Image: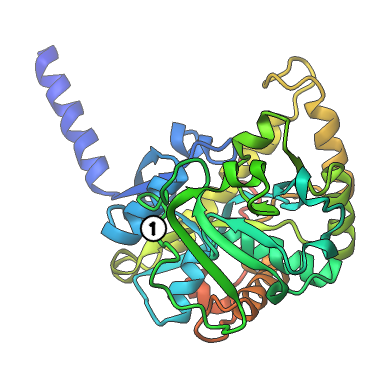
Amino acid sequence: MSRNIHLVLAQIASRQDLSKLRLTLACWDYDRTRPLMDGVVKPEGIDLNYIPMWVEETFYRMLNNKEFDASEMSLSAYTSLVSRGVDTFTAIPVFPSRTFRHRSIYVSKKSGIREPKELAGKKVGVQRYRQTAGVWIRGILEEYYNLPVESVTYIAGGLELPERESRFWGLSDRGEKIFNPNIKLVDIGNAGNLSAMLERGEIDALYSARMPSSFVKGEGVERLFPNYEEEEKQYFRKSGIFPIMHTIVIRRDVYQSNRWVALSLLKAFQRSKEVAYRENYQTGALRYMLPWMNREIEEATALMGEDYWPYGFEENKKLLKTFLDYSYSQGLLERKVEPKELFAEETLEPFKKDAHSPM
């Protein structure tokens, strides 16, 4: 008897699963997405298989093999595809990775560089010219520090290895056309690694999302902005921009077969982020091993508002326009792209939350 009951329950559970669309999502393990990964937040109508995967591998596998129904994606790589008319994916206005980038500019102590304008005429290392972090750095230095993008020679190579770490970067600079003929870009291939070259003074500076080991050693490398936190806050006060690094894309065939998926995922990511907001700000006991985390949350809220990590198209339209303008002027886009071209049309209008929703 009990065995029959278990069989019936299993059949009911199976029918419930079949009533939902099964989707695989590859995305890193962020505090703002963990409720989705753990199943605390469930997208409407979707049985979500969340695969926590480091970003470079995710980008490579999605761009080259289209292995997932949806995934995290480099904003620069995605906008490049859109500009070239490649419609393999559409995106939703969810941005799991955002970072201020003043902290990501490193200089050789041998260069004597102390301020941004002194980078003019110098050699600057980049892992890839089209890396999203680099787009922001070059744009900010030009707009706010009077350093023209074209005044620098960019040296592309591996950060720590004597060869390009191209396997999990999806798009390399090799063989890709830069649409601004005044950009000076040199690929060193296997001739060296940028971290060591910076330490030896063979390049003058480095724009890198990852911290180079030569800086960690604390000998021949330093940050251009030692007080980067204050520089970044001042930049936000002037611009209102908290730079976006990644977005979420959906394979075009999945989206076209199930147009409702875009808005369902957007709402789920939004609810997941709201859970993170609540769980991160705890006063009874520290959730994370950061002694002054609550103070930092209070400071971020005071400067940037209650929703200091905003999703949604309208909330980020100005920022996206700035990024697209930077990308076009830097020769990364074949044509000018408008922000609304990036996203599924169902996600362009703000949706009203259910007043009775617990999330």
Tell me which amino acid carries mark 1.
Gly
Q: Quadrant of residue 276?
A: top right
Compared to 21, does 109 lie above or below? above
Q: Residue at x 54, y 49 (%)?
A: 269
Residue 347 x %, y %: 53, 68
Tell me the quarter of the image containing the N terminus.
Answer: top left
Out of 337 and 116, give the one closest to the viewer.
Answer: 116
Q: Residue at x 70, y 30 (%)?
A: 280
Q: Residue at x 69, y 38 (%)?
A: 277
**Taking the image as drawn, is residue 27 in sight?**
yes
Residue 139 x %, y %: 72, 69
Q: How is the image coloured?
A: rainbow
Q: Quadrant of residue 64?
A: bottom left
**Taking the image as drawn, is residue 304 in sight?**
no
Out of 89 and 106, give the one closest to the viewer.
Answer: 106
Q: Which residue is mark 1?
A: 170
Tell me the quarter of the image containing the C terminus.
Answer: top right
Image position of 2 (left or right of 66): left
Local SS, label 1: loop
Residue 153 x %, y %: 64, 68
Compared to 43, does 173 lie above or below? below
Image position of 73 (left or right of 227): left
Residue 156 x %, y %: 52, 59
Label 1 packing within 10 angstroms: few (<14), some (14-19), many (20+): some
Q: How many marks?
A: 1
Q: Residue at x 40, y 64 (%)?
A: 260
